[in-house]
Image (tube, rainbow, N blue to C red):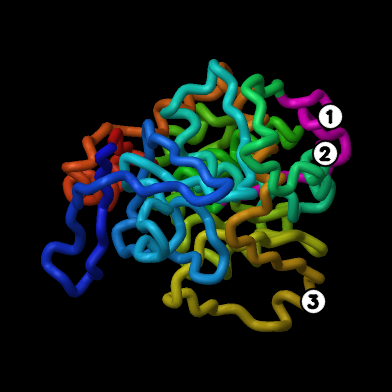
Amino acid sequence: MSAEKVVFHGPAHTPVCTVEHGPAPEPGPGEMLGRVRLATICGCSVGLPQKCRQLFKYGHALLNNGTGFNGCYATHLVVRRGVHVVPLPDHVTDRMAAPVNCALATVVNAVSCIPGNENIAAEFRHQLNVGLENVTTGGDDVTPSYHGNSDVTSKGPIMVQGAGLLGLYACALLRERGYEHVYCTDINEERLKLVPRFGGTPVLAGKEDPEDSGKENTFHAVIEVCGAPSVVPSGVRLLRPGGTYVLVGMVHPQSQLDIRGDQIIQKCLSIHGVHNYAPWHLTAAVQFLSRTASKYPYEDLVGEEFPLSEFSAAAEMAERQVYPRVALKP
């Protein structure tokens, strides 16, 4: 059986990456060789190898580690023994599902940091490392206890900083959790056009804010998913005393923060850094997607589909941020 994979040579090389052809890898004991039907890339993917150096995460593992079939950019994938596998219901399409283990599961983890949402994925904790031998094909809808949260509806508005894929997922998840006022800010007007379709109120950064979205000391929580440290001072000003700031997007070293200790202490703020997620967050993300698949336009989050042989063109499209994600169809 033949296979193809994208090999990254580093940003200093020309070309940065090439597509290699060869035999498909032989899975080891307890492993399985999977066929990749669709994968997505974003602008931050171009500087691979990717960000996870100590923990193994599919799509974020160093691509020169092991077989080279550890990420999304190949025709095949070696599923390791003991990996957490979540079945997909038939009504969840490939375009809906492809970004889940990158973005939606991370958002589930981020929202769980906001008081009143700590148990958002608690019912799935027992499913740690399900493993291939325990996978079923059904995939139930989200349980009623996951939908809505009577404890959060009176706790004030939420601000999401960044209208990319994570920000749009956050708007939908927060609305389903019972928050009536979810605002999403971005500097890009085109990106903001999708926000109302995912339950949020768009706010153009630097412009007149609608309703109470620009008031200081108002917000119950702020979630940063834009990767820009310049938004943090305004986020701190927006938070009311005792508020929660969740930092997700600033995973790069150019993230020095212009903030003083007294600004945090005097308002008794809680600050959480969220990097990726636990297995139960992935399960909760799939269940959430399954239940809301017909409510939100998830397929519109994925733009053009490119063959694996045109990875360079797909990466260039992703850098332009025309779509929240660009698809590869090996």
Q: Which residues are magenta?
A: 142-160
Q: Which mark is residue 123?
A: 2
Residue type, mark 2 in image: Glu
Residue 79 within the segment the image draws in magenta? no
Instruction: Please name which of the two marks, 1 or 2, marks the residue nearer to the observer.
Output: 2
Residue type, mark 3 in image: Gln
* Percent of width and height locating residue 50: 41, 63
Closer to the chain start, of discs 2 and 3, is 2
Q: Which residue is mark 1?
A: 145
Q: Which residue is mark 3?
A: 266
Q: Nearer the viewer, residue 330 or 223?
A: 330
In-image side of 268 versus 206 (left or right): right
Q: Are marks 1 and 2 in contact (CB under 8 Å)?
A: yes
Q: Residue furthest right?
A: 151
Q: Residue furthest bottom?
A: 261
In-image side of 57 versus 304 (left or right): right
In-image side of 106 versus 191 (left or right): right
Instruction: Please name which of the two marks, 3 or 1, marks the residue nearer to the observer.
Output: 1
- How far apart are labels 3 and 1 at the CA level? 36 Å
Please report the residue visible at 38 percent of the width from the left and 39 percent of the height from the top.
39
* Percent of width and height locating residue 47: 31, 64
Callout 3: few (<14), some (14-19), or many (20+) C-alpha neighbours within 10 Å?
Answer: few
Q: Residue furthest left?
A: 14
Under tag 1, what secondary structure?
helix
**Relative to residue 207, is residue 48 depicted above or below?**
below
Please report the residue visible at 70 percent of the width from the left and 21 percent of the height from the top.
141
* Percent of width and height locating residue 153: 81, 37
> In this view of the protein, can residue 313 be seen by the observer?
yes
Please report the residue visible at 54 percent of the width from the left and 31 percent of the height from the top.
198
